[in-house]
Amino acid sequence: MACALAPAFGPPHQALIAARRRAADPLGAVEVARSAAVRFDASSDAWVALGDAALGAYRTRDALVAFERALVIEERPDAALAAGKIYLRLGDAVTAGARFARAYAAGAGPEALRENAQALATAGDAAAAAEAIALWERETGRPWDA
């Protein structure tokens, strides 16, 4: 009932999605999240919740679409990191590197730089990977130990 009356995506929706997951119903979680994302289509939180739920149901491409939709609405480090990891799994290291760079720019910090450097190296861009590694080392104060 709280979800039906809520004027915006928020805790009631997140709780319902979490309840479906706890009940070992990942597809139910996806459907609840999809309904919320459709209803609150301007909410990046709703799209990230759909992406997370889709990942939990092994619907990788659906998750990617949801995370990318969240990024259209708002620059979010969590959505950019998640999208980058999916692109990497799908074998697109170039786009993965771009998403990790976007995550870093949005405030994801050193984790995004590490992921970016590794994706760039996988994509064969050694110079850009070296720049990302140098930036990671400056930011963390630690030597790179890939």
Image (cartoon, grey):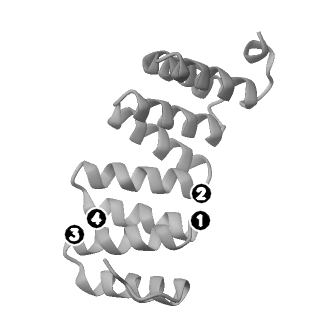
Q: Disc 1 versus disc 3: distance between alpha carbons?
A: 23 Å
Q: Earlier in the sequence, mark 4 or mark 3?
A: 4
**Which is closer to the viewer, label 1 or label 3?**
3
Q: Disc 1 versus disc 4: distance between alpha carbons?
A: 19 Å
Q: Disc 4 versus disc 2: distance between alpha carbons?
A: 19 Å
Q: Disc 1 versus disc 2: distance between alpha carbons?
A: 6 Å
User: Residue tagged by mark 1?
Assistant: 106
Q: Amino acid at mark 1?
A: Ala
Q: Are marks 3 and 2 in contact (CB under 8 Å)?
A: no
User: Residue tagged by mark 2?
Assistant: 75
Q: Are marks 4 and 2 in contact (CB under 8 Å)?
A: no
Residue 26, percent across and down?
45, 21
Q: Are marks 1 and 2 in contact (CB under 8 Å)?
A: yes
Residue 96: quarter of image? bottom left
Mark sitting on residue 122 = 3
Residue 51, percent across and down?
48, 37
Q: Amino acid at mark 3?
A: Thr
User: Residue tagged by mark 4?
Assistant: 94
Quadrant for the N terminus, please.
top right
**Which is closer to the viewer, label 4 or label 3?**
3
